[in-house]
Amino acid sequence: MSNRRAVVLGGGGVAGIAWEVGILHGLLEAGVALNDADRIIGTSAGSFAGSYLASNTVAKWYAAQSEGVGQEIAAPWAEDWLDEVEAAIAEGGQEPAAVSRALAAMALRREVASQAERMDVVKSRIDGPEWPDGPLMVTAIDADSGELHLISRDDEIPFPEAVAASGAVPGVWPVVSTGGRRWIDGGCISVNNAGLARGSDVVIILALRTDGLVRTMPGLDHEVDALREEGTRVVVIVPDAGSAAVLGANPFDPTVRGAAAEAGYRQALACAAQIATAWDSADAPLRRS
């Protein structure tokens, strides 16, 4: 299988889903064929947006952002949650798997919605129960080992559960049990997991955040530098001033979805020529050292 082109979609809550869908819709409308990607790697919010790209349903879900798409559960966005996150990070120290295990333990202690309630929300945001035909992979972290996994249709995990696992923010949404494992959000250490796109000639990254949840660990800049050192052409799209103003500070706020999608769409049209140049360069694969 060719790995010339990859699209990486990072985490960022329900607001981030909308912004990423807006970016994807604008780029596709401008003729940037991101749906020709050889790999689509989604983390948390990016697993939803990535599924739309893999299913060729981006336009449908872009329109839906302004229509109040999907069911919602109020997210417990509170200081005590932030305190517990910081405590778990401190407990794990500098070792990613240890931090992930501490975050999972915190998630299991907190009282949140049930997995069944969360699954109803997830199912309302995807095209159906089957994995998309496109080359989608989603990240999730094993709650017991703390190890990051890249889940695809080959893992025989039902698609809705895989997406729910990728977006199981510790202490906000429930730990997801599926495939004989317990899972938490794939963005717990790296919000974008851009390093998983290694081996591609061109990588387009949609990143709501460029730091990691664990701020003392390498962020997106480190991941991008490592890709470029291997000869990969990388373009990173982050919210511009207009998008950032709409997205606000709470990524779990569903009321901003329509405006966030529109802001992303406008931003995509403004940068489409740059993205097209990079994307099309994969037709002449870059020389690797």
Image (spheres, rainbow, N blue to C red):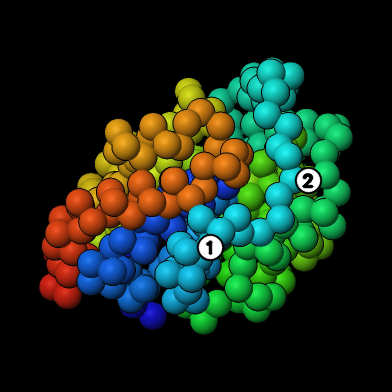
178 vs 129, left or right, is right
Assign the C terminus to one quadrant of the image: bottom left
Q: Nearer the viewer, mark 2 or mark 1?
A: 1
Query: Foreground residue, 201 or 271?
Result: 271
Circles 2 and 1: CB distance less than 8 Å? no
* Image point (86%, 35%), residue name: 111
What type is the residue that disc 1 sits on? Answer: Ala
Query: Where does label 2 land, which residue?
Result: 174
* Image point (20%, 51%), residue name: 270
> Between disc 2 and disc 1, whose residue precedes?
1
Q: Is residue 54 visible?
A: no
Q: Tell me the crowding category of disc 2: few under 14, some 14 to 19, or many 20 or more residues within 10 angstroms, Cα based.
A: many
What type is the residue that disc 2 sits on? Answer: Pro
Compute the Cα span from label 2 to label 1. Answer: 25 Å
Assign the N terminus to one quadrant of the image: bottom left
Query: Foreground residue, 66 or 153?
Result: 66
Q: Is residue 48 visible?
A: yes
- The image shows residue 206, relative to residue 132, as above or below, that is above
Query: Foreground residue, 286 or 171?
Result: 171
Disc 2 is placed on an element classified as loop
